[in-house]
């Protein structure tokens, strides 16, 4: 006689817990964020929004490292301004010396009429040199060499009238033995006041 099999318990085949996820499917997990740099507890990148300009990122970097942020477009120190004016004046002196040398080589006597002609030539060169440079490029060659720029009070480029008034202020300064140049120490020179403009750091 064959032995009788024990009866199956009811529900034994249906009590298994089925995994809801099908084979081949994985739960979407949130990607892990990179950990902060070890030792300091700070992230390796600067906490600056992406829409901020590069200048703002540089300022934040300077603050992180304890360095003061360098001002951009601010008023320069009096030294570079005085040096730029001296270089421009030296160029005029060289031109006047060259004209006088040519006249001496041609054996032209230095009469009052000749002297006035030399002065007019130097003034014409000075006007074109200064006004055209300031109106078109915002700086004379000496100013450009020292990273200086002239602009209107609102930041706009100089007009021809403003450039001409700055040139006139320079002529008055030279005629007064350079004494009006001391106004640079107060922050605004004679040319700044007459033309309604300012010299800024380029």
Image (cartoon, rainbow, N blue to C red):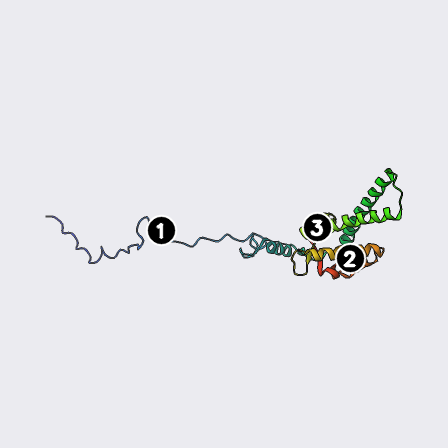
- Mark identifier at residue 132: 3
- Mark identifier at residue 26: 1
The outermost residue toward the left is 1
Q: Badge 2: how crowded within 10 Å, few (<14), some, or many (20+)?
A: many
| Residue drawn at the location 43% of the way across and 55% of the way down | 30
Q: What is the quadrant of residue 167 in the picture?
A: bottom right
- Mark identifier at residue 169: 2
- Mark identifier at residue 6: none
Q: Earlier in the sequence, mark 2 or mark 3?
A: 3
- Work out whether 193 lies above or below 37: below
Q: How many marks?
A: 3
Q: Earlier in the sequence, mark 1 or mark 3?
A: 1
**Residue 145 in the figure: left or right of residue 172:** left
The CA span between labels 2 and 3 is 16 Å
Q: Does the rendering let one see residue 191?
A: yes
Q: In terms of depth relative to the viewer, which is nearer, 82 or 37?
A: 82
Front disc: 1 or 3? 3
Q: In terms of depth relative to the viewer, which is nearer, 96 or 63?
A: 96
The CA span between labels 1 and 3 is 72 Å
Residue 57: x percent and y percent?
A: 59, 54
Q: Badge 1: how crowded within 10 Å, few (<14), some, or many (20+)?
A: few
């Amino acid at each position: 006689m064959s032995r009788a099999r024990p009866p199956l318990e009811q529900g034994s085949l249906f009590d298994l817990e089925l995994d809801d996820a099908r084979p081949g499917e994985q739960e979407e997990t949130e990607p892990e964020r990179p950990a902060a740099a070890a030792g300091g507890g700070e992230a390796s990148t600067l906490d600056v929004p992406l829409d901020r300009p590069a200048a703002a990122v540089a300022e934040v970097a300077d603050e992180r490292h304890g360095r003061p942020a360098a001002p951009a477009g601010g008023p320069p120190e009096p030294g570079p301004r005085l040096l730029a004016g001296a270089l421009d004046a030296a160029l005029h002196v060289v031109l006047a010396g060259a004209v006088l040398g040519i006249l001496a080589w041609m054996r032209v006597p230095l009469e009052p009429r000749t002297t006035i002609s030399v002065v007019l030539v130097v003034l014409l060169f000075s006007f074109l040199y200064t006004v055209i440079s300031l109106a078109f490029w915002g700086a004379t060659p000496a100013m450009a060499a020292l990273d200086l720029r002239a602009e209107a009070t609102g930041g706009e480029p100089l007009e021809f009238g403003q450039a001409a008034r700055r040139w006139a202020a320079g002529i008055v300064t030279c005629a007064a033995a350079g004494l009006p140049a001391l106004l640079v120490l107060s922050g605004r020179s004679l040319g700044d006041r007459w033309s309604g403009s300012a010299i800024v750091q380029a």
